[in-house]
């Protein structure tokens, strides 16, 4: 079975500050890992994904995440927050088999203040 | 290219009423999914389909039925709506491991 834990349901940062959203996973097989972003009243948009290969993954809007197998983590970071980054962020895991549904964490709401 | 389209976007139902949510994708994806999103709960899988004519239960299937008569469409039905089904419903499709999501349907049951 697979599961995802997102530490912190709400994270607040100042504009220009580092963004760090935490995600830990549990998986009995090599995981595929994803970060999605949801802006208010919109659907989910893929930020980045890890499948195999390089453990540091770069995504859209300046975000990146690092897969650390030893820590079972896939934390999302951005060096400098923008006001437009305020949204809800979801970490998700898959077993990598085509058609397998993603399993999501409960989400982290990011607030950015000026 | 519309991607994944959900109809309707908003709906208010009375307890006991029935309704069908429609999901249509134009990417020729084999796999389709219905999730519900509730505050503090993330997205939970209701039902999914691995191909035309197939459906399977997810994590929270009770009170819902689905059909996939055509490859591009995945319907979610509520036979007798309950207030506990007030939620935002998302449809997604995929051809591999990455899922593409619709804009959601906000359903309120009063």
Image (tube, coloured by chain):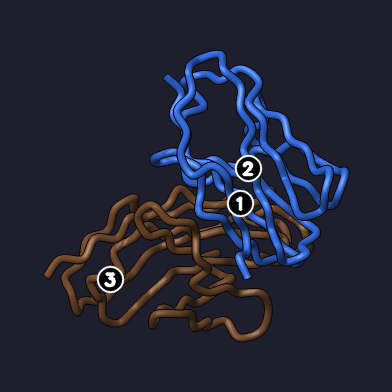
Chain colours: A brown, B blue
| x, y percent for residue B34 | 64, 44
Judging from the image, mark 3 belongs to the subunit labelled A
**Vertical side of A65 occupied by B29: above or below:** above
> Which residue appears at 29% of the width and 60% of the height?
A110
Residue count near mark 2 (Cα–Cα under 10 Å), binned few <14, some 14–19, many ≥20:
many
Please give the label number shown on residue A91: none
Give the image location of residue A37, x and y in percent: 44, 63
Mark 1 falls within which chain? A
Could you tell me which residue is drawn at 39 percent across and 80 percent down? A61
**B13 w.r.t. A36: above or below:** above
**Local secondary structure at mark 2:** strand
Which quadrant would residue A34 be assigned to in this image?
A: bottom right
For the residues carrying marks 2 and 1, which lies nearer the camera in this image? 2
Characterize the local packing of mark 3: few (<14), some (14-19) or many (20 or more) Cα atoms within 10 angstroms. Answer: few
User: Is there a contact, CB below 8 Å, between mark 2 and mark 1?
Assistant: yes
Instruction: Check if mark 1 and mark 3 are on a common chain.
Output: yes
First in residue order: circle 1 vs circle 3: 3
Report the disc number at residue A84: 3
Chain letter for mark 2, please.
B
| Local secondary structure at mark 3 | helix
Q: How far apart are labels 3 and 2 at the CA level?
A: 29 Å
Task: Tell me what residue is drawn at x 86 percent, y 49 percent.
Answer: B52
Q: Residue furthest bottom?
A: A54
Q: Which residue is mark 1?
A: A103
* Front position among marks 1 and 3: 3
Q: Is residue A70 left or right of residue B57?
A: left
Residue A35 percent location from the top left of the image: 50, 66
Which residue in the protein does label 2 denote? Answer: B45
Which residue, as the protein is rendered here, is positioned at the far right? Answer: B53
């Amino acid at each position: 079975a697979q599961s995802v834990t997102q530490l912190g349901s709400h994270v607040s940062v100042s504009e220009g500050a580092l963004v760090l959203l935490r995600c830990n996973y549990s998986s009995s097989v090599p995981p595929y890992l994803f970060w999605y972003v949801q802006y208010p009243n919109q659907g989910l948009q893929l930020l980045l994904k890890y499948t195999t290969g390089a453990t540091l993954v770069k995504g859209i809007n300046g975000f990146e995440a690092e897969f650390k197998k030893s820590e079972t983590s896939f934390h999302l970071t951005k060096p400098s927050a923008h006001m437009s980054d305020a949204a809800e962020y979801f970490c998700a895991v898959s077993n990598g088999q085509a058609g397998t549904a993603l399993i999501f964490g409960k989400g982290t709401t990011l607030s950015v203040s000026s | 290219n519309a991607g994944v389209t959900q109809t309707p976007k908003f709906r208010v139902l009375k307890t006991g009423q029935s309704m069908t949510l429609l999901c249509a994708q134009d990417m020729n994806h084999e796999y389709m999914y219905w999730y519900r999103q509730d505050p503090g709960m993330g997205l939970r899988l209701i039902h999914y389909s691995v191909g035309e004519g197939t459906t399977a239960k997810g994590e929270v299937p009770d009170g819902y039925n689905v059909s996939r008569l055509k490859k591009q469409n995945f319907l979610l039905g509520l036979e007798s709506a309950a207030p506990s089904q007030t939620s935002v419903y998302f449809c997604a499709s995929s051809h591999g491991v990455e899922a593409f999501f619709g804009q959601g349907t906000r359903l309120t049951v009063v």
